[in-house]
Image (cartoon, grey):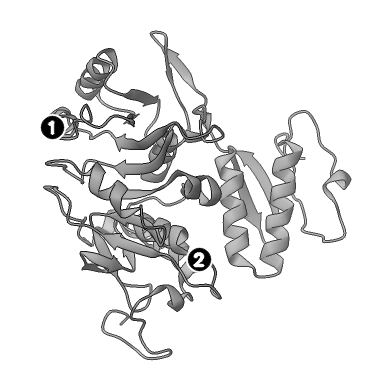
Amino acid sequence: MHGGYPARVSPDPTRSIEDVPISPEDPPGAIQRLALRRADARARRAWADADRLRTEIEAAGWNVIDQGTDFHLEPAVAPDVIEDGQVRYGSSVSVPSRLTEPATDTASVVLVAPDRREALRRALGDLDLSSRPGTSLIIVANAPDAEVTEALADTETAGSGEVLWLGQRLSPAAAANAGLRRATGSVIVLLDERTGPTGDVVTPLIEALADRSVAVAGAFGLDSVDMRRWTPAGPGRVDALAWGALAFRREDLVARGPLDERFHLRRSLGPWWSLVLRDEGPDSGSRHALAIALPSGSSPEPEVDDPSLARATKRDFYRLIDRFGHRYDLLRSPAPRGGATAAGR
């Protein structure tokens, strides 16, 4: 044993979880079962299954650390803290989930709060949902500074929406997962400060998802020929959508989520989640991604070469490629197999 957790657990297909001694300090048996299933998937080179199981393990608050063909499990979440009677969650999984309950609203808007007070006030003002009955608002306060905290406290007092307070800065995916766990709408609209709404962005997104062939809709379309490089596209059908304004069905979040919190940046996260929502399997026709011209003052985040982010960018890139790099069936205009392209050079 190592630090109360199994130091090494070999993916022996003849061994069941009951063969692994478990102390009171060990991960729950259900988590160890998931980890053993993931190890078996890795041994079979079923990478999509392994990736999905790892996401489930991490969403439950554990990290799986690979050691060759073995692994061990470590706690992954920071503790919640209470400040002035207010809970500040240490992780997304600590947020009480409503996703096991039936949907009660038409839509839920999840807004990851901007880091600047004026940007927050502008977003809330332009996003005014008072004329949209049946739409709930969840605001994620991702370890904000004092000024943003004050503005969010005013919003909470006014009853304009539910505010989730995070005690430490979480990744974009983790912050979004915190808000998504509270969504009660049949359609979820996920926004962040880059959306910059200048009018009603919710209604067009809800209407787009009335078409069951559409899996995800948003403001910033992307196309690719090889899953390696993405170029702006739309409006209309696109291969994927950039982060910033995404709408999808709550039932799909329950079936295919949560978001993979190992993504460090938003650049690959938007395409990855779009493809997850679209994917019906390589032998089935995929559902569509739809880019819509929304009243928004923002544009998708440009690809800027920042040396300080190079390692995170590379890890995110390979995370997307590990899952979808071979799935040319999800692209509308894939490059010829084995041929070099301008985008892929």
Q: Which element is circle 1 on?
A: helix
Q: Residue at x 33, y 28 (%)?
A: 143
Residue 182 coordinates in the image, percent (x, y)? 44, 31
Three-letter residue code for mark 1: Arg
Residue 116 coordinates in the image, percent (x, y)? 17, 32
Q: Residue at x 29, y 50 (%)?
A: 207
| The C terminus, quarter of image | bottom left
Residue 300 coordinates in the image, percent (x, y)? 21, 56
Three-letter residue code for mark 2: Arg
**Is label 1 or label 2 in front?**
1
Say left or right for 160 vs 70. Answer: left
Q: Which element is circle 2 on?
A: helix
Q: Which residue is mark 2?
A: 323
Say left or right for 315 vs 129. Answer: right
Q: Which residue is mark 1?
A: 122
Residue 28 coordinates in the image, percent (x, y)? 72, 36
Residue count near mark 1 (Cα–Cα under 10 Å), binned few <14, some 14–19, many ≥20 = some
How many angstroms separate mark 1 from mark 2 (CA)? 37 Å
Question: Number of marks in the image?
Answer: 2
| Residue 74 position by quadrant | top right
